[in-house]
Amino acid sequence: MDNSGNSLPSGADGRKRRVTYHYDQEIGNYYYGYKHVMKPHRIRMTHKLLDAYNLLPKMQVFQPRMATVEDLTQFHNDDYIDFLRSITPKKAEELPDICKKFNLNVGQLDCPVFDDLYPFCSSYAGGSLSSAARLNEGSCDIAINWSGGLHHARSFCASGFCYVNDIVLAILELLKHHQRVLYVDIDVHHGDGVEEAFYTTNRVMTVSFHQENIFPWTGNIEDTGGLVGKNYAVNVPLQEGITDENYHFMFKPIIKKVMEVFQPEAVVLQCGADSLADDRLGRFNLTIKGHGECVKFLRSFNVPLLLLGGGGYTLRNVARCWCYETAVALDEELDNDLPQHDYYEYFGPNYTLHAPPQRVWDIKRDTKSTTNLHNIKKTVLQNLSSLEHAPSVQFQERPPNADPGEELEDMVE
């Protein structure tokens, strides 16, 4: 499909896209806590579903390396990373003031201190860095790390279930080889940590489509960047209950304009699945096909693409979504009837890839609501039109490239 919605072969030259997939076999073992909605186990569920659909042999599968302290401090403060390395649940009880400084807590529901917190951070950040390194070396067209996409973390503290901002780290890696990187965020929550990191540069454009008036209560349409980054931060706040049709009424024209004026050399797409219908935290009405259409649309521009996870708190739908979007990346069709696999019973009573929503959020259908969508789109497009041309930059001496990780021949754990 090209950016007007017409069908295209897998690549502009008719070849299949080369896709790499980065997965740590230990990722499903990390545990925020019994009552916490963030469950890394969803990544293992996704992986098992990919295996059941026989998608793994169609990609290069990599065990990502663990991110090092040197990797993490490319963005994060030294004292914060040192604290993450040393903190344990027992120590956290003894150091409440320092935990509070870094926005960590014990037994609460935002950013708890749990066993093996630092290895967890190193794992998902390493996956995103390995993915970016593969794109930089030109060995793939699309790289996937579903354990990444934790977009709220700041340089100096945790936020919103996110401890290390793997997205910022991946973009910094991509900037070693690409003059301009586009970041697109379709999580139900605003991608505030990434926007803040690149707010004053014109080498990274951040575009966030998110539900208005929820955590982190940022992402106003008026927030457009600062200094040379003016109009390179794009925010599209949307009302709860939005459907596929209205979402793409906003998404496609805005992204098409972004690609036209910014001309990115690489794209990072955060595919937060909490913008799906039935999510435990989000209040959008997107279907998996509607969500995946964003991947399909950005794929159609044939620019190196990094796909990351993010939010998503109804586990079976997260696995469905990211499995489907992996198939979109590969240009593979999947049967709607789920194949038998280890987590098959989680997907009842329908046992299908595209299950009908069990709960539909009300959406305003009055003239005011429709006018609001039109006005937001008009404002965003006008701001983008003020950018006369894509910025160019003189490359300086490049820092060493990140280690892309180790290829695995057989991975079904």
Image (cartoon, rainbow, N blue to C red):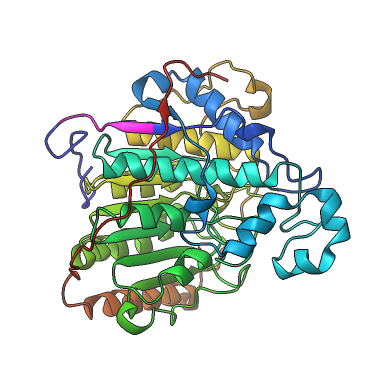
Q: Position of residue 278 (x, y in %)?
A: 63, 47
Q: Is residue 6 above or below residue 76?
A: above
Q: How many marks?
A: 0
At x 32% / y 39%, what residue is drawn? 134
410 relative to 344 in the view: left or right: left
> Between residues 375 and 235, which one lies in front from this camera angle?
235
Locate residue 216: give its quadrant.
bottom right
Say if residue 237 shows up in the picture: yes
At x 65% / y 48%, what residue is drawn? 359
> Between residues 69 and 103, which one lies in front from this camera angle?
69
At x 53% / y 58%, what residue is drawn? 151
Locate residue 40: give its quadrant.
top right
Q: Is residue 199 above or below residue 162?
A: below
324 relative to 282 in the view: left or right: left
Q: Quadrant of the N terminus?
A: top left
Q: Position of residue 290 (x, y in %)?
A: 43, 47
Residue lying at the far left of the rendered structure? 13
Q: Is residue 26 above or below residue 313?
A: above
Q: Position of residue 391 (x, y in %)?
A: 20, 71
Magenta stretch encompasses residue 17: yes
Magenta stretch encompasses residue 245: no
At x 45% / y 45%, what residue is drawn? 128
> Between residues 263 and 300, which one lies in front from this camera angle?
263
Q: Is residue 283 above or below residue 44?
A: below
320 relative to 409 in the view: left or right: right
From the image, give the main secondary structure of the stretch colored magenta. loop
Q: Position of residue 264 (x, y in %)?
A: 24, 59
Q: Which residues are magenta?
A: 15-20
Q: Quadrant of the C terminus?
A: top right
106 relative to 295 in the view: left or right: right
